[in-house]
Image: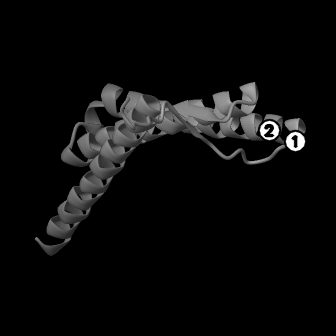
Amino acid sequence: MSNSSSMPQFLLLAFEDRWELQLLHFWLFLAISLAALLANGLILSAVACDHHLHTPMGFFLLNLSLTDLGCICTTVPKAMHNSLQNNTTISYMGCAAQAFFFLFFISAEYYLLTIMCYDRYVAICK
């Protein structure tokens, strides 16, 4: 007999224990995520359709919008699901995947913002 233990899932703390406040949490996150999806979708379509925006800064805005969509789509759906289903667990693999993708998109966003700042710096100095 071996002495081993495993963690098949993690317990998440809910924002609130009352069902009414969990529903409020769900609707609030739904409204915020839909607004972000709409805004980023408008940026994507504007940059893709308008030929005047096919510049390096337009390219960076397009990629920044895509990374923002990735950040939103990584974390918000699970939080909404947990508040709607009154569930407080996440699997180990689900947590690892969510953490990996969230860190990937956040780091990509920081790199893009750094490149955009350097691009504006060079444009101002020259």
Secondary structure, mark 1, is loop
How far across and how far down the image is residue 19, in percent?
86, 35
- The quarter holding residue 34 reads top right
Q: Which label number is shown at residue 18?
A: 1
Instruction: Evaluate whether residue 66 shows in this view.
Output: yes
Residue of label 2:
22
| Residue at 38%, 33% in the rendered image | 97
| Residue at 19%, 64% in the rendered image | 118
Amino acid type, residue under disc 2 in the picture: Gln
Q: Which of the two residues, 81 or 5, is positioned nearer the viewer here?
A: 5
Amino acid type, residue under disc 1 in the picture: Arg
- The quarter holding residue 67 reads top left
How far across and how far down the image is residue 49, in percent?
34, 25
Q: Give the colouring mode of the picture.
A: one colour
The reply, left or right, for residue 71 in relation to residue 76 is left
| Residue at 14%, 67% in the rendered image | 122
Instruction: Evaluate whether residue 38 shows in this view.
Output: no
How far across and how far down the image is residue 47, in percent?
34, 34
Q: Which of the two residues, 88 or 121, is positioned nearer the viewer here?
A: 88
**Callouts 2 and 1 close, C-beta under 8 Å:** yes
Q: Which quarter of the image is occupied by the C terminus?
A: bottom left
Q: Which of the two residues, 113 or 53, is positioned nearer the viewer here?
A: 113
The reply, left or right, for residue 94 in relation to residue 53 is right
Secondary structure, mark 2, is helix
| Residue at 27%, 37% in the rendered image | 52
Tally of numbered discs: 2
Compared to 88, does 14 lie above or below? Answer: below
Compared to 78, does 11 lie above or below? Answer: below
CA distance for labels 2 and 1: 6 Å
Q: Which of the two residues, 11 or 69, is positioned nearer the viewer here?
A: 11
Near mark 1 (Cα within 10 A), the count class, few <14, some 14-19 or many ≥20, is few
The reply, left or right, for residue 85 in relation to residue 5 is right
